[in-house]
Amino acid sequence: MQVSTIIVSYNTFELTRAAVNTVRTSSPEIDQEVIIVDNNSPDESGAKLSQLYASDDAQQIKIVSLESNRGFSAANNIGAEMATGEVLFFLNPDTETQSGAVGEIYRFLIENGRVGAVGPHIINPDGTDQQSITWLISVGTLFKHYLPLHALFSPSFERDAGSPKITREVETVKGCALAVRRDAFRESGGWDESYFLYAEERELCYQLKKRGYKTYFLRSAMVMHHGGASTSLEDYAEQQIIQQRSALRFIERHHSVALSQYNRVMGVIGFGIRAVIFRFLYLVKRDESYRLRGQAASTIFRWFVADYSS
């Protein structure tokens, strides 16, 4: 088997079906299996998917229905244990793999022995770039994260999309579509199940790097991601705090206390500035989105001040 695509499903029957269909037809020349791990979906997605693919003659779609929600990392590890492919392609259910992408990813990993992980070019449903890469944590990357000067002074307050214009080595790629050499995955220890949500891909890429493997962004392979196209402003603060807790866990595990405190100071400054700017813009323009952004920034600011902990 060349590629094992692993999809973790939770209440995403329709999305998962689309993800499976597109990844299977992306590169018909590739010998591929799909493993769906359902995290005990209340809407019975696991049973529906099992029924849908029960007649699959090639038996190349495997469904695992867990008895409890084990989380993203644990479910991925369960899928990986069942996999027989040389390459493990971890894919979110809210994705659609574009033509040729699976073959591009497989060939790139097989032809470049010291490349452990590859992330494709992630796009929005409208074809525009979505963030495809992230960075390991350092003084510099934290500064850029909390004080994105380009975004703060642009009319739309949008960050750089985070998709390089060419294929190149990067520090980490997004976990919504991440392919790993099977041998490198096992050597790295797999997905770290101590992370509740977010930062799992950073930990995985970090562990690969420690073992001498490189991570690459592959521009020629494209995957459309529904989930990252927009973020609900009502849920932004809660989501961001979960992300910050995961980032803090990574810092405490791999960096010094000084960097942890620097992260806290930068968070206070960065979200304090955001709270003031968006409050001012709301008073001037009466745009509801600015009011919601200001409220979210204030909530995150208070977390950094009073509740900063992992």
Image (cartoon, rainbow, N blue to C red):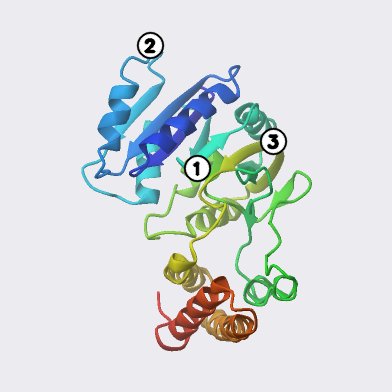
From this viewpoint, which residue is outermost toward the right?
Answer: 166
What whole-number distance in Å separates the C-alpha atoms at marks 1 and 2?
29 Å
The residue wearing badge 2 is 57
**Rendered image quadrant of residue 6:** top left
Specify the amino acid type for callout 2. Answer: Asp
How many residues crowd around disc 1 within 10 Å: few (fewer than 14), some, or many (20 or more)?
many
Q: What secondary structure is found at the residue carrying circle 1?
A: helix
Q: Out of 269 and 288, give the one closest to the viewer.
A: 288
Residue 131, how many percent across, how many down? 63, 54
* Quarter residue 239 falls in: bottom left
Kindly report which numbered mark, 1 or 2, lies closer to the viewer in this rendering: 2
Q: Where the C terminus falls, by quadrant?
A: bottom left
Tell me the tag on residue 185: 1
Label placed on residue 112? 3
Residue in the picture at 46% in, 29% down: 20
- Amino acid at circle 1: Phe
